């Protein structure tokens, strides 16, 4: 049974067709990249999967359950977590608090007006673990809004992980990052995929990252699927080279 | 001093000042009843700030729940039973339940739209209280009713004539309400309120049903507000339609902003400043509101984090 199955989804904004009949299947543990030129509909496609808005047509299934009409927070409960192209964090809270909120949501505590000692310890341990994994332990008590861009990106990814998702959607995780930070994030994503067997769908512009990480790649252009295949197949695909990599390539 | 020690020292100072108020207030030209009034208004401002400062939602009609609390308490004492605790209970339930019901209708509105709808609700209750003279006393307000002695089993406390005893009764009520507020804000639910204030989109995509959480925070805030309103009816032995009016809502928001809306205790300090200014300037000129307004504008322009926000910044740098 596939984890995520998207069947011919489209999204129209007035007369603009942002996503046009795109289908995608993601197996458990798979790392899938979505690439395409600016305006190809990649982020809109993510917004459809994560429930930011409903598709104009088409269906979305998680574990063969139809989630097309499910709210975004319901999809989080079911195991879909995402990050955003432009970092979305809680700027005036510390890194620790930023991670604590999703960690408590994941443990079903979000409506609790109190916290038993055992729950509190469990949450703290989980937050420490995430801080360690994200390389944020030494900045845990800084306000996240005051940290460099790279640390904010890492915090956002760790917030998504704190939800214990089964499917992680990363929207250009290395956008605006230097080489060193890009390397760190790439290493993190690879370990999530290889060691934790987490299914990941990744939008990315940095081709080194994409070809290094992805099991399969989907190429979008003007809202539709241009090509789909392994990195080698995509690299050899003439239509992709024409539309995306430029005719010279 | 470490962060934790500083917080403990501040807490100790606040509670010491409150507990000893009947002793020191006369020395600075105040009187105990003024202290009682400030504390009740401070609780109301803290209730507004529970929503404004910690959930990021501005209600500009919160006086509605304050006033409903006052009328609920007064009506019970006047028509139903001569019992102070039952009066508090009736007022708190009336304001809190109405707030919860109407809040459910508006939690999808945001920003200025939310503020406008809350003003409208407040004005509806204002005109009901104003027009329904047979029940509410209309423009003259609801009277006569009096707070009743407290029967504590072993002893009876006359809070009607003994202003110091009444001050301590209000202080105990205040302490319970404030402890509940502080407790909630430090809980997982309280952290989801902060999350919504900081970044609603992020909160939503972390699996928090934002509308539901705003509704709960709004309803809790209404209950606290109605509790403060019930106490206010006991303070004055009187309930007034102006307690429901949007200008009263504005006063509460002003107190919260003056004191510092990102701080827990700021609104109490804001209430102190507000009432002191009001008391002092209104003894000089009937146009005291001009000066409060000017002071408010100056504060917002030069100290947008409020009085307590400034003190805190000084302490950390």
Image (cartoon, coloured by chain):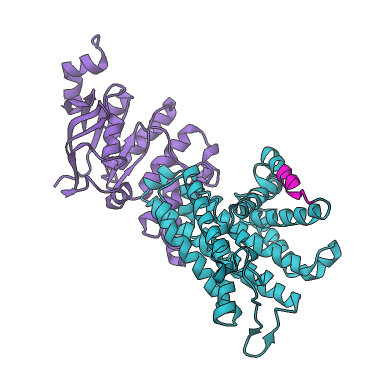
Chain colours: A purple, B cyan
Tell which of A69 and B140 is nearer to you: B140
**Can residue B182 be seen here?**
no
Q: Is residue A45 left or right of residue A84?
A: left
Give the residue displayed 40% in from the left and 48% down from the top.
B108
Q: Quadrant of the C terminus of chain B?
A: top right
Q: What segment carries the magenta color?
A: B286-295
Tell which of B170 and B124 is nearer to you: B124
Q: Is residue A205 above or below residue B241?
A: above
Q: Is residue A200 left or right of residue A239?
A: right
**Can residue A234 be seen here?**
yes
Q: Give the main secondary structure of the magenta stretch.
A: helix
Query: Is residue B293 magenta-colored?
Result: yes
Query: Which image quadrant for residue B291?
Result: top right
Give the residue displayed 43% in from the left and 39% down from the top.
A88
Image x and y of residue B96, in percent = 49, 65
Q: Is residue B173 above or below residue B126?
A: below
Image x and y of residue A69, in percent = 24, 46
Tell which of B142 and A220 is nearer to you: B142
Query: Is residue B182 magenta-colored?
Result: no
């Amino acid at each position: 049974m596939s984890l995520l199955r998207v069947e011919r989804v489209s999204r129209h904004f007035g007369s603009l067709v942002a996503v046009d009949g795109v289908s995608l299947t993601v197996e458990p543990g798979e790392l899938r990249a979505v690439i395409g030129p600016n305006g190809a509909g990649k982020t809109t496609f993510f917004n459809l999967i994560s429930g930011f808005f409903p598709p104009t047509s088409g269906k979305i299934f998680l574990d063969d359950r139809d989630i097309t009409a499910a709210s975004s927070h319901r999809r989080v409960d079911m195991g879909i977590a995402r990050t955003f192209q432009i970092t979305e964090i809680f700027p005036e809270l510390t890194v620790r608090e930023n991670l604590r909120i999703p960690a408590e949501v994941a443990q079903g505590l979000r409506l609790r007006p109190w916290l038993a000692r055992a729950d509190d310890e469990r949450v703290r341990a989980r937050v420490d673990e995430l801080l360690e994994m994200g390389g944020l332990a030494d900045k845990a008590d800084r306000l996240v809004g005051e940290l460099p861009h790279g640390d904010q990106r890492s915090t956002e990814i760790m917030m998504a992980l704190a939800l214990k998702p089964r499917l992680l959607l990363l929207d250009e995780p290395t956008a605006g990052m230097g080489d060193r930070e890009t390397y760190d994030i790439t290493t993190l994503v690879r370990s999530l995929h290889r060691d934790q067997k987490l299914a990941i769908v990744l939008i990315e512009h940095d081709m080194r990252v994409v070809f290094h990480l992805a099991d399969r790649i989907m190429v979008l252009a003007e809202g539709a699927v241009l090509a789909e295949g392994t990195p080698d197949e995509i690299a050899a695909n003439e239509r992709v080279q024409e539309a995306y990599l430029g005719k010279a390539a | 001093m470490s962060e934790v020690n500083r917080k403990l020292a501040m807490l100790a100072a606040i509670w010491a000042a409150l507990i000893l108020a009947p002793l020191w207030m006369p020395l600075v030209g105040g009187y105990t009843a003024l202290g009682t009034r400030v504390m009740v208004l401070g609780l109301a401002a803290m209730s507004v700030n529970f929503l404004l400062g910690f959930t990021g939602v501005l209600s500009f009609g919160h006086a509605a729940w304050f006033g409903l609390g006052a009328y609920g308490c007064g009506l019970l004492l006047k028509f139903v039973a001569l019992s102070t605790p039952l009066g508090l209970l009736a007022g708190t339930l009336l304001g809190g339940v109405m707030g919860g019901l109407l809040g459910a209708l508006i939690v999808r509105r945001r920003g200025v739209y939310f503020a406008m709808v809350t003003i409208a609700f407040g004005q509806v209750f204002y005109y009901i209280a104003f027009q329904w003279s047979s029940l509410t006393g209309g423009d003259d307000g609801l009277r006569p009713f009096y707070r009743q002695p407290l029967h504590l089993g072993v002893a009876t406390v006359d809070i009607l004539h003994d202003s110091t005893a009444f001050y301590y009764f209000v202080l105990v009520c205040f302490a319970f309400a404030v402890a509940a507020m502080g407790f909630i804000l430090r809980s997982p639910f309280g952290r989801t309120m902060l999350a919504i204030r900081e970044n609603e989109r992020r909160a939503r995509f972390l699996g928090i049903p934002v509308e539901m959480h705003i509704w709960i925070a709004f309803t809790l805030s209404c209950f606290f507000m109605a509790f403060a309103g019930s106490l206010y009816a006991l303070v004055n032995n009187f309930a007034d339609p102006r307690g429901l009016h949007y200008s009263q809502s504005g006063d509460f928001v002003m107190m919260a902003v003056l004191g510092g809306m990102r701080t827990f205790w700021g609104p109490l300090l804001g209430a102190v400043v507000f009432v002191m200014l009001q008391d002092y300037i209104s003894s000089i000129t009937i146009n005291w509101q001009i000066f409060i307004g000017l002071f408010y504008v100056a504060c917002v322009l030069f100290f947008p984090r409020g009085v307590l926000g400034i003190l805190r910044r000084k302490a950390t740098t």
